[in-house]
């Protein structure tokens, strides 16, 4: 079994997709470069220019799992994924300040959300549950995996909890942003044991990334 904690190598779990394109230049500035083009390969684990650093490319929602359980020492993931994962089983030492957006509620333009029990569609079911319970509001959460904007239009839900950047996606679907839940940006997370056992390696990478962020 592969276990990142048993030796002095670092496994870094990267989020595939839009975050990757913004993270790779920062990693390069920090001195870590994959030895092949991550976007052109179907591989999931890659060597880097550093003999003791390997890179994994996985879904953002899986990054916290790999890091908490120690199969990756370091993870790079959106705060939205970290909030949805919900555990505090790893450190979150650095904000890379990229892929910024907001987690918000959104509803059809002008709609009054006064039903005694709101129906809320989201991929972020834990975030949504926690937010509405803090507000003391009764909700039924409907889990969807994509195209959330369709849910209110098709009468599946009263509102949604989703990522908003420019707001164009909402507007194009007759929705408007309503309540702000959290500011999102890309974070570096570190396995608790790796932080101790591989302290020098981890700390040196964090320092170089911090400088790259500026
Ligand atoms: P926008 O139309 O600019 O508000 O972008 C909204 C859509 O883009 C959302 O539904 C998300 O799926 C996606 N999106 C925008 N920014 C991010 C981000 N930083 N991380 C993940 N998804 C994003």
Image (cartoon, rainbow, N blue to C red):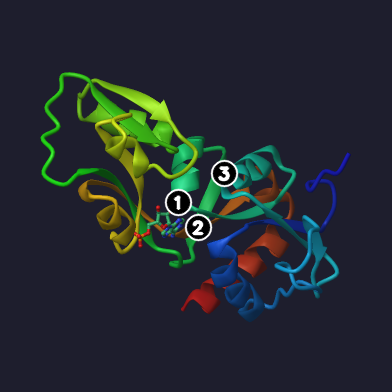
Identify which residue, 111 or 48, lies in the foreground.
Answer: 111
- The residue under the point 15% across, 23% down is 115
- CB under 8 Å between callouts 2 and 1? yes
For label 2, the residue is 187
In the displayed structure, 144 sits above or below 149; it is above
In the displayed structure, 148 sits above or below 114; it is below
Q: Left or right? Give the position of 32 relative to 175.
A: right
Q: Quadrant of residue 117?
A: top left
Label 1: which secondary element:
helix
Q: Quadrant of residue 141?
A: top left
For label 1, the residue is 79
Q: Which mark is residue 55?
A: none
For label 3, the residue is 61
- The residue under the point 49% across, 46% down is 81
The spot of residue 92 in percent (x, y) is: 51, 52
- The residue under the point 54% across, 78% down is 212
- The residue under the point 70% across, 67% down is 39
Q: Mark 3 or mark 1: which comes first in sequence?
A: 3
């Amino acid at each position: 079994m592969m276990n990142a904690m048993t030796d002095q190598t670092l496994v870094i779990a990267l989020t595939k997709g839009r975050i990757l394109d913004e993270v790779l230049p920062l990693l390069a500035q920090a001195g870590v470069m994959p030895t092949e083009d991550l976007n052109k390969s179907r591989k999931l684990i890659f060597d880097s220019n550093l003999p003791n650093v390997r890179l994994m490319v996985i879904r953002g929602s899986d990054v916290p799992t790999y890091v908490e359980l120690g199969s990756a020492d370091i993870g790079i993931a959106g705060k939205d994924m970290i909030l949805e994962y919900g555990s505090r089983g790893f450190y979150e030492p650095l904000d890379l300040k990229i892929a910024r957006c907001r987690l918000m509620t959104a509803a059809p333009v002008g709609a009054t959300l006064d039903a005694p029990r709101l129906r809320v569609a989201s991929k972020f079911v834990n975030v949504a549950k926690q937010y509405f319970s803090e507000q003391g509001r009764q909700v039924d959460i409907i889990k969807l995996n994509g195209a959330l904007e369709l849910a209110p239009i098709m009468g599946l839900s009263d509102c949604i909890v989703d990522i908003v950047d420019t707001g164009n996606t909402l507007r194009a679907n007759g929705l408007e942003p309503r309540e702000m839940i959290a500011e999102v940006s890309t974070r570096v997370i570190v396995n608790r044991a790796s932080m101790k056992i591989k302290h020098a390696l981890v700390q040196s990478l964090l320092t170089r990334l911090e400088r790259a962020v500026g």
